Each structure stands twice: as C-alpha cells, then as structure tokens.
Image (cartoon, rainbow, N blue to C red):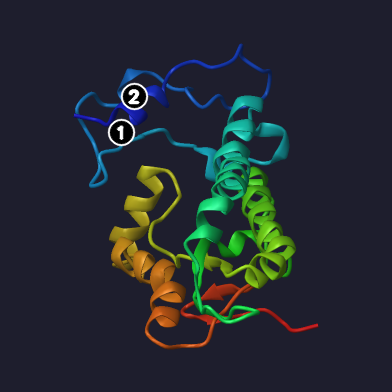
Amino acid sequence: GALASALWSQAPLWAAEEGVMQPDSGDAADFPKGMIDVNGQQVDARRSNSWLLKLHEVSTPEAAEVLAINALAPFVLNARLRPLLEATVRRTASDPPTIIEPTFIINVSAMEGKFYRYKTPNHPHTNMAKAALNMMTRTCAGELAAHGIDMNSVDTGWINDENPLERAAATAERNHFQTPLDEIDAAARIIDPILSTVNGGDRVHGQFLKDYRSIEVKV
C-alpha cells in the first residue's frame, strides 16, 4: 500500500481559503485507494496540481510545508549537525593542522531556484524554497570550508514530469517522451562532489553544481 507519508499528505490541514487550491482538494476518485507509483507514493489523478498554481492560488499550508521541507529543515539539520561534521574532519597533527579529509553537506536543489533561469508564473513557492536553499550555500560555504566542511548545492536534473498525471501521460504518449534522467542519475549527481574529493579531486565548496560541474559565474 501507500506509504504513511503519502496518506498523511491527504489529511485536511487548514480551513478552506477562497480562490486557492487546497493540498487535499479532490475526491476519492482522484486518489485511487491502493494505486501507488514506483516510489510508494499515492497516485494523484487531479487535473490540476501545485506545479500549475500561481501566487494567489497556492494555499497557506502548502506554501508553509514546501518552505519548511526545502529550506527550514535543511537549515536546522546543517546548523545542529555542524559540531559532529567538524569533529569528524581528518586533520594532520601539525600546528596549525592541515585538512586531509573534509566532511560534506549537499543541499539538494534545482534550477528553479536560480534567479537568471527562465520562469513561468507558476509554482512560486517551490522556486522560492530552492532559492532560499541556494542562498544558504552561498552564505555559509566559505566559513564552513575553513573548518573542513564542504557545502554545495546540487541540481538533480530532470527526473520526472511534474504536470498532472493526465497531462503528463498525454505528453508521453503523443511525443514518445520520457524525462532524460531517472532517480539513479539524480543520486549520482548528488554524491559526486563527495566521491570526487574522496578519490583525490580538488575540494569544492560554495558552488551550484549541475551535470557534475559548477555553473556559477565568478564575481
């Protein structure tokens, strides 16, 4: 069956707000019982979803949830785990010590969080959340690197079609389309900054990495 998190996502969270789409909008037919995707998530058959919503159409709880998951939670985790990450950096016994093996923070991001990237007027809340995550990397990475912690943001690549199920299926059938990458490709991109350094490559920090390379403009 569906994962518990998928079932909780359908629970009413907030009194209805006029003119906005609630996260739990829809009837039972839109969430067929027992029908899950390859990741154990409840299939959502609604004809509209968060990906298509404009600023005034996004509900308050959905905006709060997206920002909490994608920006606030990483902020708290990175802040509170810093002592552990710093304590496990390998250093020489010299004075001052030299960092032999750093530890790593990978903020999993997306191109939607880049200011210069073309934007539709849709899903501003998800764009905002990833932009906030990128700003944490930009702000904190230099200071963390001095203590042996390499922080970067990484774009996973295009691994799924975020459009409603019916629209995504029609596009796939009409154009013989599937996204160019899958979850394995995404995972490879996420861990690449770690493996590259561990295997003898140069340390990298404070970068937004896409397709295994930095796309930041140096200023």
Mark 1: which secondary structure? loop
The answer to whether 145 appears left or right of 6 in the picture is: right
* 133 over 199 or under it: above or below: above
Given residues 51 and 134, the one toward you in this image is 134
Crowding around mark 2 (Cα neighbors within 10 Å: few <14, some 14 to 19, many 20+) is: some
Q: Position of residue 141 (x, y in %)?
A: 67, 66
Mark 2: which secondary structure? helix
| Whether residue 117 is visible | no
Q: Which residue is identified by label 1?
A: 42
Quadrant, the C terminus: bottom right
Q: Residue visible at 21% across and 32% down?
A: 35
Q: Residue visible at 66% across and 33% down?
A: 57
Q: Which amino acid does label 1 sit on?
A: Gln
Q: Position of residue 106 (x, y in %)?
A: 51, 62
* 33 over 89 or under it: above or below: above
The answer to whether 20 appears left or right of 108 in the picture is: right
Q: Do the residues labelled 2 and 1 touch (CB within 8 Å)?
A: yes
Q: Where is residue 121 in the image (x, y as percent from the top left)?
A: 69, 51
Q: Residue visible at 65% across and 65% down?
A: 144
Crowding around mark 1 (Cα neighbors within 10 Å: few <14, some 14 to 19, many 20+) is: many
Q: Real-space Cα distance between discs 2 and 1?
A: 7 Å
Lower position in the chain sequence, tag 2 or tag 1: 2
Answer with the quarter of the image where residue 30 lies: top left
